[in-house]
Amino acid sequence: MQIRAPKTKRAKRELDKRAPKLVENVKKTLILHGTKTSAVLNSVLTELYHLKRDNAVKFSKKNENIKPFETGGETSLEFFSHKTDCSLFAFGSHSKKRPNNLVLGRTYDHHIYDLVEVGVENFKSIESFEYDKKLAPKIGSKPLFAFIGEEFESVDELKHLKEVLLDFFRGEVVENLNLTGVDRVFVCTALSSKTILLMHCALRLKKSGTSIPRMELVEVGPSMNLVVRRHRLPSESLLKEAMKTPDHAKKIKNVTSDVIKGKTGRIYIPDQKVGDMPLSNNIKGLKRERREAKQNKESKKRKTESE
């Protein structure tokens, strides 16, 4: 594969955005579906996009070649992930064997990292809930998560699903959080070793007589049951590679590294002020000028003598 350097500043900026960083960008989500979907699954994918539309890309066309968990069926998915620069994805499909099937997954270096396949049951859309629209969560706000049930710590399938959901909805990583900016909560309740109830609630802050306000949850949707069908964990080598932390080496001033050019440096040379520099008489150019002047003088003298 030929590697070409960017020719314009715009292309260079786009490549810099996709380049590895010590602090990664907000993870984008790719939402797409297969050849057959149901009305329920279309609503699920649409409302997932509504919850993450500030950092999400949704495809509307059918995708025949995408078949997660099958050999060769993930190539197109990895291509779309690289094209859209998305490290999370939600793929919906519907069949008689697996109705209302939803696959949530993550990628590392634009290759499939892990997969969780769930079936959607008892889905309730946002429009089916009645509440004060002033309580509607704002776009881009940080959500809280509440996991109810010991199965999230003891059952491997639910433990894996918990990790994927946290990565799917966490948004931007921040160090400090203002309490007044927290306006939504995702409540996950383990109904069994394979089934969870996912609810999206708005957070209402009320006076409590102390510095800490009293919180009330108002369900705003969507709400659904997720039944775990299949899941695939990353291999040990891939897990070790993805969990590497960067070495915090001392940054060298004016030295950068590039994939194509390698290690490059920038040198600053002060003004040399050539006009103020003393010139030596032992300069070849001056010797040549003196020699030419002497020859001209001798030639003129010979002419006068001949006359």
Image: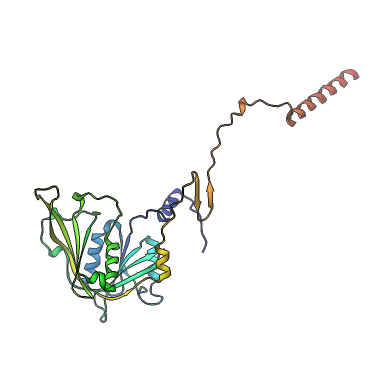
- Residue found at the far bottom of this picture: 97
Can you see residue 307? no
Q: Quadrant of residue 96?
A: bottom left
Q: Quadrant of residue 190?
A: bottom left
- Residue found at the far right of this picture: 306
Q: Quadrant of residue 169?
A: bottom left
Residue found at x 16% / y 60%: 201
In the displayed structure, does residue 184 sit left or right of residue 161?
A: left
Residue found at x 53% / y 53%: 262
- In the rendered image of this protein, does residue 292 appear above or below residue 33? above
The x, y position of residue 214, in whole percent, is 12, 53
The x, y position of residue 119, in whole percent, is 24, 74
Residue situated in front as seen by the camera: 60 or 121: 121
Residue found at x 73% / y 30%: 283
- In the rendered image of this protein, does residue 93 appear above or below residue 180? below
Residue situated in front as seen by the camera: 43 or 143: 143
In the displayed structure, does residue 227 sit left or right of residue 285?
A: left
Can you see residue 40? yes
Residue situated in front as seen by the camera: 175 or 36: 175
Question: Where does the C terminus fall, quadrant-wise?
Answer: top right
